[in-house]
Amino acid sequence: MSKNLVIVESPSKSKTIEKYLGSNYKVVASQGHIRDLATSGPLGLGVSIEDGFKPNYVPLKGKKKIIASLKKDVKDAAHIILATDPDREGEAISWHLKETLNIKEKDYDRVLFHEITKDKVLDAIKLPTKIDDNLVKSQETRRILDRIIGFRLSKLLQAKIKAKSAGRVQSVVLKLIVDREREIESFVPEEYFTITAIIEDTEASLFKYKDDELKLHDENDVKKILSALGDKYNLSSIEKKKRKKASRAPFITSTLQQEAVTKLGFSAKKTMSIAQKLYEGVDLENETVGLITYMRTDSIRLSDEFVGSAFRYIEDNFGKKYIGYTKHTKKTDNVQDAHEGIRPTSILREPLKVKQYLSNDEFKLYSLIYKRALASLMSDALMDQTTLIFNNNDYLFKATGSVLTFDGYLRIYSDYEKNEDKIIPSLIEGNNYEASDLISEQHFTKPPARYSEAKLIREMEELGIGRPSTYAKTIDTIKERDYVKVEDKKFVPTKIGFETTDKLQEFFSDIINVKYTKDMEDELDEIADGKLVWNEVLKEFYDLFEPRVKKAFSDMERKEAEETGEKCPECGSALVKRTGRYGEFVACSNYPECKYIKKEEKKVVEVCDCIKCNGKILERKTRRGKIFYGCSNFPKCKEAFWDKPIGEKCPECSEMLIINDNKIKCSKCNYVKE
């Protein structure tokens, strides 16, 4: 008897869902996209510009066997359910599956799984829909835009300045980093001074003279003030007020990435990889279940069902006074109560209850998501804030303190959001007090800070460039292309990063900028809403873009290869530095007549002893230049690691200990050295 065929993207998700659906269903995985634009045709774009930007799709490398297997599954199926991820990219994958596998309209349904739990999966199966063509066209337009800009600008930069690539969003993000670095380089620090009185062990800062705000930029002014001050500080006012501190909203994709960077030290890429696993399903004691809802979302809304269960949990565990309120955007109708913030699929799956089934990093991220969602529904923290104003010959000094009187949401979220009491002594208004010390300090204004990964993601989100689901990939790309390096967890542009930005701004300043990129994102959203025609948007872009590309190919100066000062041993010409697919190398400047390439002397770096044999663990590089660590006795010994090993055995499983996230961990199990 034929079964219903469900096609998802991930093999691990397919196993989880098949357990829920039972014997009448077969669940298989496409393993992501199965096809993409060809690299043939005019300019290698895989797009027919003259034919209304008609795309030419071909199977992705390595996907022909998967496609053949899927075709057989489709042929044998009673009915097909396309259940790829519930976002624009997932919608496009479903459409590609439908087209590639020749699935007829009447033979399929589209189903969205926003959380991988048995109840929600079964509910979703009962409420099928069809592929949203507008979402598909929006994704397709984005892909064609990225292909045209990426291919044309990358070829230009490779030919002219030996840069590796350019991209619609990537190049704008690089410009942000370069612009910030130039702000720092041109910054001129300004001198300023502060005066602080220590009164009853409390710091009171000078801020006014009578009714005028004081800004001290001259040392002589400071001396005049110090000489004008008397011994007595009159407490002219005491102001006490209650202050509320509200919890923040549940995570969306961008805020999850930011918080995981700052609180857990995870990269955006690592965060999304772990979140994907938590969404797709984890083997617990008696079930396999997704622990969080779908992690690619722009909404902070939580379902009524989850809010109700969370309020009951809060009352049962902390008391009624800890119940808060929802922070959500306007609710829209959707068959599956879609577009929620990132939250646990059940408030009863407390982090400690599932810890034994998770890796150390999975537990950390799940705890963060769980506690953020729960805290968002808890009551405000309450504080007593006290402000003291002291008057000394009309010079006013201010001291401020606060004391937490009710912890509210901090009861659950204090691991991630610290609140320290600053206690103000109990003094009497109108009394005079003496200062035990009077401190004047010289300061200098500081330049704007370089972007950390969290701050860069926040900037991309606020400026509206790119999509939250692509932030991690964009940041990875500019690092892989050597356009930026990371120093003290901050991005610093490299020489080629500066050159790439400068050349793009010289010829494409009206396209490679924040406003144009944001406006294009808005237009893609309008295509998704059915308000704009996709190929008309592409035509308007192309008519602006292509003439500038042709002008740049004609007018942009070609960067001469840098000479090393050595001569070619074969023809006597100068040796120069060149950049190839796998990084920089030295070759003859007389290429192609002379094809001499200088062989790089490989420096052997011993890291530690191998714990599996008598060999040494050496630092090595892949063909693409990525560092890894492998045994000198390879292939007899296949010990290899991406993280740096330390030559010690794990006390729990005897495997190699490595350094990961500045901690010593086991390369196999969840052991972390204290």
Image (cartoon, rainbow, N blue to C red):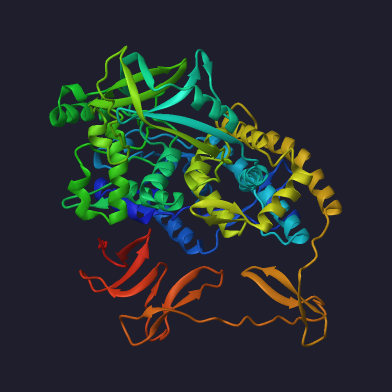
- Judge by depth and name the residue closer to the eye, 64 or 382: 382
Q: Nearer the viewer, residue 211 or 160?
A: 211
Quadrant the C terminus occupies: bottom left
Query: In the rendered picture of this protein, how many numbered marks are placed on residues?
Result: 0
Q: Depth check: give the residue in front, 17 or 620.
A: 620
Expressed as whole percent of the image width and height from the top left, the position of residue 667 reads 32, 67
Q: Is residue 382 above or below residue 317?
A: above
Q: Do we see residue 92 in this rendering? A: no
Is residue 364 depicted above or below 370 in this figure?
Answer: below
Q: Is residue 556 left or right of residue 386?
A: right
Q: Is residue 644 above or below residue 87?
A: below
Q: In which image quadrant can residue 618 be found?
A: bottom left
For image coordinates 62% across by 34% down, the residue present is 518
- In the image, is 152 to the left or to the right of 458? right
Query: Which quarter of the figure has residue 609?
Result: bottom left
Residue 248 at what x, y percent from top left? 36, 30
| Of the pair 650 and 166, the residue shown nearer to us | 650
Whether residue 28 is visible:
yes
Q: Horizontally, is 455 left or right of 279 in the view? A: right
Outermost residue toward the right? 554
Residue visible at 26% across and 46% down in the picture: 21
- Residue 491 image point, x, y percent: 55, 51
Tell me which residue sits at (80%, 75%) in the image: 589
Query: Where in the figure is residue 14, as x and y percent of width and height?
Result: 34, 52
Residue drawn at x 39%, y 39% as measured from the top left: 111
State whether residue 373 is above or below residue 20: above
